[in-house]
Image: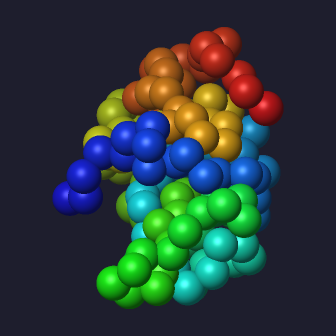
Amino acid sequence: MSKPIEPQDLAHEENLVWLEDISVLDYVRQSLDRVARRRGKPPYHRPGRLVGYAELSAEAKASRASGSFVRRVFWLAPHDRDQQPDGTYAAAAPSEAVDPRTVAPGETGDKTERSQGGPLSTAGDRG
């Protein structure tokens, strides 16, 4: 399991790119990945699919040790609720899951009733 995402990890986020319609997703998993570029679609090496990613501002500095950038990615595993509505996460969600409607550049996003397996929530739609 990766470390929780802290606000300072997201300080240079400028834009979020969604590859899917997030209005139909109860939750997405979010993680920090080391990648070679500030912008553009990052490589994806997990089971499941990439749903979105953050792009960084020109002020974001690469790691001195590796020359890479830390960027947030949003993804879903093959056993997540969108593919298996009656499966493991029918009434719960993975620890790194957030409601994608509550995510914005520089903001981690929230767990809502909807993301945690409850009814539709009106909490915090950020667009």
Q: Residue furthest top?
A: 122
Q: Is 18 placed left or right of 61 in the picture?
A: right
- Name the residue: 45% across, 27% down: 111
- Name the residue: 25% across, 58% down: 2
- 100 shown above or below 49: above
- 7 shown above or below 65: above
Q: Give the image quarter of residue 64.
A: bottom left
- Residue 41, percent from left and from top: 69, 77
Q: Is residue 73 visible?
A: no
Q: Is residue 110 visible?
A: yes
Task: Tell which of 73 and 117 is nearer to you.
Answer: 73
Q: Residue furthest left?
A: 1
How is this picture coloured? rainbow
- Number of marks in picture: 0
- 27 shown above or below 55: above
Picture quarter with the N terminus = bottom left
- Residue 120, percent from left and from top: 61, 19
- Name the residue: 61% across, 14% down: 123
Picture quarter with the C terminus = top right
Task: Tell which of 57 and 46 is nearer to you.
Answer: 57
- Residue 36, percent from left and from top: 55, 85
- Residue 61, percent from left and from top: 55, 68
Q: Is 26 placed left or right of 5 in the picture?
A: right
